[in-house]
Amino acid sequence: MEVNPDEPYNELPEILPDEKYWHLLSVYEQANKANRALAELKGRLSAIPNPEIFINTLSLQEAKDSSSIENVFTTNDKLFKAFTLNSTADPHTKEVLRYGKALVDGFRVIKSGNAISVELMELIYRNIKEENDGIRDFPVYIGNEYRSIYTPPCCRDVILDKLNNWVLVATPKSDHIDPLIKMAILHYQFEAIHPFKDGNGRTGRVINVLLLSVYDLLDDPVLYLSKYINEKKNDYYRLLLDVTKNNNWEGWILFMLTAIEETSKYTLDKVLTIIGLFNDTKEKMQDEVPDIYSFELLEILFMQVYCKYAFLVERGIASRNTASKYLNQLVNIGILEKEKVGNEFIFKNKGLYEIFRK
C-alpha cells in the first residue's frame, strides 16, 4: 500500500513486521557483531569498582550528540560547566542538560524494576522539552515548507493504541527475536508513530538506551549511540522513510545494528582511556601529594570534568577550607586547572577534558 504523505498514516502496521523482512543472514551476521561489541563494553564496565564515575560524563556526550541531530547545539565546555554550576546557561545547553537528566532518570526507573510504559515515554518527553502536555491530539506534518514527506498517525486514541502495541512487543518474552533486532524495529515504530508535538527523535533515542537495560545488555546509560546516527544523519532519516515507503527493513536494521557495534567499540575505547587516566592520576597523587590522597577524592575528580569545593564538602571528604587546600594542591601538580566563574572557583580535570575534546 502506498503511503500518502499528506494524510495521517493511521494504517501504520502493528509490529512486528513479517519475518521475511528481517530474518536474513545479513541481519543475523551484523547482529552477532553488535552483540559481541556490546557484551565487551558491558563486561569491562562490570569489572570496574565504581562504573558510576562514567555516567555523568558519558551520558552528557550521548545527550549532546542526540540533540545535535535535531539542530540543538552546544559545546562540551558549556555543557560541563553548566552541569557543575547549576547556573544560567543558554537555551540549547539547557535543553541538552535536560536530555542527559531524562536519560539517567529513565535508566534509574528501569533499573528499579519498572517496565517501559507510555507513562515513562511521556515523562521522558516532558523532561527533555520542559513541557506539561503529553500524547498529541492533533496532526503534525514532517517535511519542509514546500511539501510534506510523511504525516504520522492521528489522533490521541489512535496513537495510544499503537503505543500500547509497542509496549506489548517491547516487553521481554520468549519470542526468540534477537533483542538488538527488536530494538531497531521498535525505534522505527516509535518514530513512525511520532506521539508528541516535538522531541520525538530525542525521546526515541533515550528509549533505545533504556531498552538495552530492559534486555539486560547494558548496566549503565553510557553508550554513545547517537554519535553514529549524528554522523550519518542523512542515512538515518532516509532509511526511516524507506521502511515506510518500501518496507526496506533490512537496510534500516543493518544501519541500527552497525550503529550499536561501532558506538560500543567507541564507548569502550573512551572508557579504557578514562581508566588509564584514572590510574595515572592515582599514581601521581600518591607520589606527589600523598598527604591529601584518598580514593574518594580521586573518584570525585572523575565524576565530572569540573569540580568545586562543595563536592568535597557534600561527600564528607573535607571542610570548605580543607577542600580549597586539596584542590589548589592538585592545581599545583598539574592535575587540575583553576577558573573563576562569577563568584565561584571551579577546577577542570585537564586530562579528562582532553579525552572528551578529542
Image: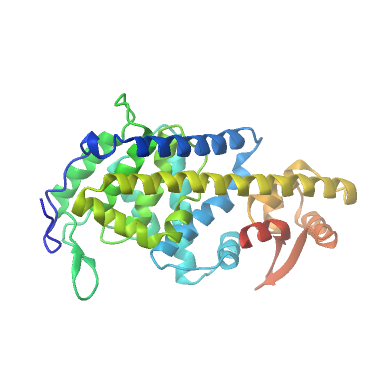
> How far from the left and from the top, in percent, is residue 114?
38, 34
Q: Mark yes or no: residue 202 visible.
A: yes
**How far across and how far down the image is residue 34, in percent?**
46, 39
In which quadrant will I find the C terminus?
bottom right
The answer to which of 49 and 271 lies nearer the viewer is: 271
**Front-most of residues 150 and 100:** 150
Nearest the viewer among 148 and 100 is 148
Residue lying at 36% horizontally and 39% vertically, measured from the top left: 26
In the picture, measured across the screen, residue 84 lies left or right of residue 114, that is: right
Residue 134, image quadrant: bottom left
Q: Position of residue 218 (x, y in %)?
A: 49, 37
- Examine the image and state in which quarter residue 50 appears: top right
Q: What residue do we see at 89% from left, 51% from top?
A: 288
Q: Nearer the viewer, residue 263 or 152?
A: 263
The answer to whether residue 219 of the structure is visible from this angle is no
Is 93 drawn above or below residue 281 in the view shown? Answer: below
Which colour style is shown? Answer: rainbow
User: Hey, which residue is sitting farthest bottom in the picture?
Assistant: 146
> Furthest-front residue in view?
25
Where residue 153 sits: x, y (%)? 16, 54
Residue at the spot 38% in from the left edge and 56% down from the top edge = 202
**Residue that appears at 55% across and 36% down:** 42
Q: How many marks?
A: 0
